[in-house]
Amino acid sequence: MTLSLQKPRSRHAARISFLLALSLAWSAVSGAAEVGKPLPDPQGFAFDRTWPSTRGKVVLVDFWASWCGPCKKSFPSLEALHQRYKAKGLVVVGVSVDEDPAAMVRFLKQHAVSFPTVRDKNQKFVQTAKIAAMPTSLLVDRRGTIRFVNSGFKGSESEAAMRQQIEQLLGGAK
Amino acid sequence: MNACRIRVLGLSLLLPTTYLLTGCTAVEPWQRGKLAEYGMRADRDPLADSLSEHVYFSREAAFGGRSIGGGGCGCN
């Protein structure tokens, strides 16, 4: 008799635990940069350099840091993409998440690139985009919607994937 | 009365546990600058590494797996 009275209560507790776990899991993943979501408006964040004009352009936003090995490897590929597609309407923006501005400057001296780079001063922009790995490149269409997310950098495989997506968004530009 | 006590006990355990769990947090990918520093590497000091390696393979008869095996005699 006692057991039969306890059962619904334990079921109730299990249901509450499940909902709690679900809400925790949801809070962990919600807000992440995903395909189909808009890119957070950069104008609302603090950068130590001016965010380039991206109105009506296809934008490749790359989150990187001076301490991140794969970011270093990704820079030549990003530069190549910038050189290849800038005339066709692509803007590459490097967003450094370095806490130390001097570290970013040192890195850029060693790995010079011609695309614009800014530093996310208080890491609020990256926090809002909630990327899953370093580096992460978000390809944003002309309307500001994220159309492709490249997490991490796997050499030519990543470059080819980004190139394919860029060409699609630029309307078949080669 | 008993059920009431159990409930109070349960709550008194649940609240501190919840409080402690909130102290666990994931280090986000963009917050790993300090962890990526050279000083955080296990193999940051090659000399100390080779010395401790020597001590291990000389003294540990069962030690191996790093291409050198010692007999435990300390004579290597």
Image: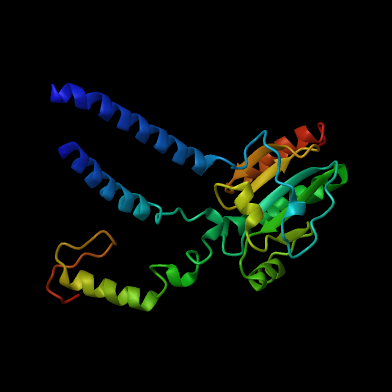
Q: Residue at x 76, y 32 (%)?
A: A168
Q: Residue at x 27, y 50 (%)?
A: B12
Q: Residue at x 77, y 34 (%)?
A: A169
Q: Is residue B14 above or below residue B72?
A: above
Image position of B60 (left or right of A171): left
Of residue A61 and residue A87, the one placed in the foreground of this image is: A61
Of residue A131 and residue A31, the one placed in the foreground of this image is: A31
Q: Residue at x 19, y 43 (%)?
A: B5
Q: Position of residue B68 (x, y in %)?
A: 25, 65
Q: Quadrant of residue A100?
A: bottom right
Q: Quadrant of the N terminus of chain A?
A: top left
Q: Quadrant of residue A110?
A: bottom right
* Label tally: 0
Q: Position of residue A152 (x, y in %)?
A: 57, 48
Image position of A47 (left or right of B44): right
Q: Position of residue A115 (x, y in %)?
A: 78, 56
Image position of A57 (left or right of B40): right
